[in-house]
Every structure is written in C-alpha cells, then in structure tokens.
Amino acid sequence: MAMTITQKILAAHAGLDSVHPGEIIMAEVDLALGNDITAPIAISILREKGIQRVFDRDRIALVPDHFAPNKDIASAEQCRQMREFARDFDITHYFELGEMGIEHALLPEKGLVLPGDLVVGADSHTCTYGALGAFSMGVGSTDLAGAMISGKAWFKVPTSIKFVFSGKLRPWVGGKDLILYTIGRIGVDGALYRSMEFTGETIDSLPMADRLAMCNMAIEAGAKNGIITPDGITEEYVKGRASREYTLYSSDPGARYDEVHEYDASAIDLQVAFPHLPENSRPVGEARGVSIDQVVVGSCTNGRLEDLRQAGEVLRGHRVARGVRMIVIPATPLIYRQAMDEGLFEIFLDAGAVISTPTCGPCLGGHMGILAEGERAVATTNRNFVGRMGHPKSEVYLSGPAVAAASAVVGSIASPEDL
C-alpha cells in the first residue's frame, strides 16, 4: 500500500505495516511537551491519581514560556507547579529562565525533535516540527497526561493535501509569506483534520527557518499537521544536534491525496493578513498606509536568528517612527546571544526598538506588549483573532519580519521597498 510520509510515521510508531486515513490507532510517542499554561493541568491529573513515575523522564519536555518571566501571582504558581513536578519526577528536559526559550524554537535547536519522530504537545503549534520531517500535533492537557504516564497516544490517521510550490521567491519573501498566501487561498478550515504536505522546487531550496514558519502555521488552516520531506537541508540542521538515531521518511509515488494545490512562488508577493483571521491575507500593497501603534518581531513563527537578521537589515540606518512601539523577541537564549554577537542588538537599539528576553508574551495577549482599545499592531506572530494581543477592539496584522520592520519605520504598514 502506497503511503504518505505522515502515514508512514504513524504506522511505524503504531507497530503496523500500514495505516489508512480514518483509522484509529494507538502509537508510541518520541516526545511529550507541555508549557506553563497546559502542563499544570496534566500535572494535576498525575498528582490526583497518585502516579509515581512517568514513562521516560528523557522523553518529556516542560517549557514555561507563555507567561514567563512570571507576569503575576497566578502565572508564578503555575510555573512553580511545573518546577516542582520536574524536580520530583527528575524530568531531564525542564527549561527554566536562562535556558528557557519559546518551546517550538527551543526543542529543534536542542535536538530533542528529529526526523521521523512522533511528537505530541499540549500546544496547538506543536505542528512546527513537521519542518524536520516529523509527525507532530497538538493535544489537550488530558492527552498529555496520558502520554506522560504511558508513552502512548491515540490518533485518527488524517488524509493529506499536497501543496506544490515552484519558482524563485521574490526579494524579502519567505516561508511566512508562503503559508499566509496558502491559508488565504484555502481558508482557516481548508485543511481541517488533514495533513498539509509542502513540496516542490521552492520548498527544496527553502532554509530551515522558513520551513519551520510554514509548518508552524498549518494549524491556522485547521490542519492536524504540516510536514516537509527531510533532505540535505534537514540533515545539515540536525547534524551536531541529534544525540539519538532518526529515520528519514518520504511519501510513496502512488500515495493518495485529497487535493493537490500548485502555486507559482515567483508570483507571490509579501503578505499581510488583516484582522481578524489569518485567511485574510493580501499582498502588502493592499495594506500599505494602515496606521499602526506597535510592531512585534518574534514568536515561535518568526523569532529565529534568520528572522532577526532580516528585520535588522531593513532597520539598519533607520529609526522607528514616533508613536510606534517596536518589540523584538529572540526565541531562545542561543538566538539572543547570536543576535547580540552579530551586532543586531545595536541596530535594534539605535532604531529605538526594545529587546525582550525569550517569551511567547504578546503573541497570546499574555504580557510584554498588550494592546489597548483601538490600537493596531503588525506582528510576526501566527494569530490575529479578536482580542488575541489585548483589547477586543484592538487589531493585529500578521506579516513576516521584513514588512514588520519596514512598517515600524514608516509608522504604517509598508514594504521594505518603501524605504
């Protein structure tokens, strides 16, 4: 039976020769992930049931990144609960401040997710790891509790949609623009409970940071997972990071897809998603002139070194417009140090931006950049729902780092070419 890469990974972890769409399976997980919002619920379940040990202390990752550094007493209590659990159960991969980064940037960087893995995380953007050729998806806190106890989780095998990108990217256009364009074509429910498989010559030459951005936002199309076949770029990324064996899977030539979408990447412009859905994606020219109050460059979508470099390239020699707040959030401590060593911090500070410790913060309306009533932000984050970054009557426009940086300088949504 011909299978997609997603089906092959699920079959292997279920101990089966093959699986078919719609089949319910129980599969072993390589890693179970929780953060400071979702893990405390799972931890409470384990405590209440009197569980004394987890399935494997080396295959659980706990990352307090949403409200850390603690923004208030409630978040401090949640993080303490994680900290005490990690101590009591001797969890290897618990990341406190100084080591803590945004989970979906941190775990690949640490080599904790590898090609061919099956990963569950109590966070919807766990689908990010598909960029490495892994099957990864978000689950609820109760499923996370079950995975931490048993090392297994149940899955309904998804059908797949193939997205084929060909052509050379325009200047400044990256993975964020490709995924916003895609969601704009199919809608926020266009891949509901299905696998989004990204392929084609454009993807083959796409750097890992852009691949991670694309798979990160598969959930914004309703997908169960996003995935890219691992190749030389993937192996170059995991080389030196991997401390265990991994498997490179690829889809069979005769694998079946619900749909196949083909896009000419050379025709895709820089994208901006208007409020209040990621599917409201338009070319930057149609957004030009929309006044803004805040710019955020960061998040598990675009907080990597390559994203900061792009923002820095646009900002160099310019100042953030008067009346605009620009917040730059490196996604991990390593990225923070690399950006500082490369002189990017000097560019950001000279431009009038502020630099935050790694945190999810403003992306979920947590802290470090909450919007007031009527305010507008351009953000490299992944969601722009009503009230996502603050007041229900605020607005978030999604973009890549180049548009975000240019908009900070102009004071309204702009393209780097406008500078």
Image (cartoon, rainbow, N blue to C red):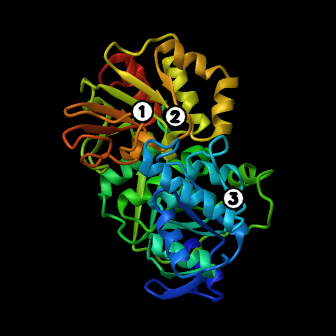
Vertical position of residue 231 compared to residue 11: above or below? above
Kindly identify which residue carries mark 3: 93
Taking the image as shown, residue 181 lies to the left or right of residue 327, namely left
Residue 115: in sight, yes or no?
no
Q: Residue at x 59, y 48 (%)?
A: 105
Kindly identify which residue carries mark 2: 329
Element type at mark 1: strand
Residue 357: x percent and y percent? 56, 34
Q: Quadrant of the N terminus?
A: bottom right
Q: Residues within 10 Å of mark 1 (few under 14, many from 20)?
A: many
Tell whether label 1 touches label 2 (CB within 8 Å). Answer: yes
Residue 192: x percent and y percent? 35, 69
Between 253 and 19, the one nearer to me in the picture? 19
Which amino acid type is marked by label 1?
Val
Whole-number angstrom distance, CA of label 3 to CA of label 2: 22 Å
Q: Quadrant of the C terminus?
A: top left
Q: Quadrant of residue 161?
A: bottom left
Which amino acid type is marked by label 2?
Ile
Whole-number angstrom distance, CA of label 2 to CA of label 1: 8 Å
Q: Residues within 10 Å of mark 3 (few under 14, many from 20)?
A: some
Q: Earlier in the sequence, mark 3 or mark 2?
A: 3
Q: Quadrant of residue 305?
A: top right
Which amino acid type is marked by label 3?
His
Kindly identify which residue carries mark 1: 296
